[in-house]
Image (spheres, helix red, strand yellow):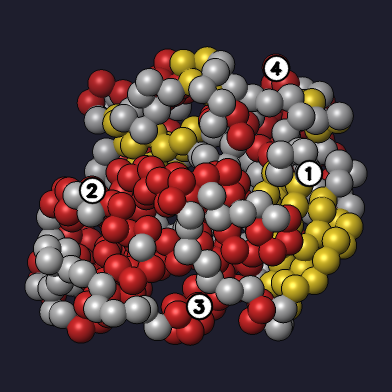
Amino acid sequence: MSVAEYEIDYSDVAGRRIECPPQCGLCCLCQPEVLPEERAYFRSRHPECLIKTRGADPHFALALKKGKGSCVFLEDRRCRIYDHRTAYCRQFPFHFYVSDRVKVELDLSCRGAWYGTGADAEAEARSLAAAADRRLSSAVREASAVYREFYANCREAGVMSDPALLRTSVSGNISSFTDLGYISRVMELSLEEPRMSLEGVRPEGAPDMEELEDAARSAAMESLGYEDPVSVPVYCDRDWNWNLFMAREDSIEWAVLDDDGEIHHRAFADPAKIGLRPPEPEGARVLAEYLSVLNGRDSMMGSVFALMDETGYEDDMANAYYGALSATVLDVLWRASMLDHFMSTGMGAEGMKETIIFYDMDRLDAPTIGAFV
């Protein structure tokens, strides 16, 4: 199977431009795998920088400063081995998500994806896809089999829906998904109805804010609750600081990671005192645009499928998808409220943009039945 024999969807990057801000270095905090064909260079030139990771999927990777900072090759936010950087370094901020096809997804945690200047994103993605053809071909064969099995399980359990129709339904109601009352009603129906529809869904009175806040806070605390700082979501702010927000028991710690791999405390906050705030009108517009991106991502659908598989196909696919999108909105809005609490970013267009920059890398890292290559 070659690049001509499987479908690649470039719609997420079509018409966009991308650049790499020299002050950023966010991608150098993502420990890259070193492919077999790349290992000889590092073994001969930098053997001390090649390590074997631990965990369920051990692989060779580049070492991090003090085991938790940026890549050891990053100096003054510049790569010392730029011409020999790994394939995964070259691909960022593009992600190739493999299901029964390949979808190019753009990591919006990269600030260079927001400027509208730089290189043609689709042309860059096509070049990277051609270079990754062998890996993509192998992954498509494996992921296609997984997806076929998943769909068969859904049909057998009677919970199958048409993913394309689900996306169309969400697309027609995208602005409603920024309204807390609407989200509350969707979440209720996803638990109550055997197979829910978005047709005719309207908020029924004021939402139970305490219940929504509890749900949002719980999800956010779980996503920020890592003991290992390497796994904590990083927010590269407008001043190019690498911010970490770590949930520790009943508090959230804000810290900054420096270029030498040291973590510096900034502040603590009681999560119970961070209320879930609705977006301002311009913030809602930015959030709706982001939800449109998520609604088009195969990895978002794949993460819903992974949840359905994990829970034994108890919920209809429509209920699972609409519920997951609603939970995502709650997570984003609570994180926006948290960022505003610590950094006064607000709930308008700028605050929502900053929250998406903070959130999207974490969203792309969610479990899925497919694979990122």
Q: Quadrant of residue 73?
A: top right
Earlier in the chain: of badge 2 and badge 1, it is: 2
Q: Amino acid at mark 2?
A: Ser
Q: Residue at image x 25%, y 30%?
A: 6
27 left or right, relative to 296: right
Closer-to-camera residue (153/111): 111
Asked if the residue under mark 1 is in contact with the one under mark 4, i.e. CB atoms within 8 Å, the reply is no
Q: Inspect this view and state whether residue 135 appears.
A: yes
Q: Position of residue 129 (x, y in %)?
A: 41, 24
- Mark 2 and mark 1: Cα distance apart in space: 35 Å
Q: Amino acid at mark 3?
A: Glu
Q: SS at mark 2? A: helix
Q: SS at mark 4? A: helix
| Residue bearing mark 3 | 213
| Residue bearing mark 2 | 171
Q: Amino acid at mark 1?
A: Asn
Earlier in the chain: of badge 1 and badge 3, it is: 3
Disc ID at residue 83:
4
Q: Position of residue 33 (x, y in %)?
A: 62, 41
- Mark 1 and mark 3: Cα distance apart in space: 29 Å
Q: Nearer the viewer, mark 4 or mark 2?
A: 2
| Residue bearing mark 1 | 241
Judge the density around disc 3: few (<14), some (14-19), many (≥20) Cα neighbours within 10 Å. Answer: many
Disc ID at residue 30:
none
Asked if the residue under mark 2 is in contact with the one under mark 4, i.e. CB atoms within 8 Å, the reply is no
Q: Nearer the viewer, mark 1 or mark 3?
A: 3
- Mark 2 and mark 3: Cα distance apart in space: 26 Å
Earlier in the chain: of badge 2 and badge 3, it is: 2
Q: SS at mark 1? A: loop
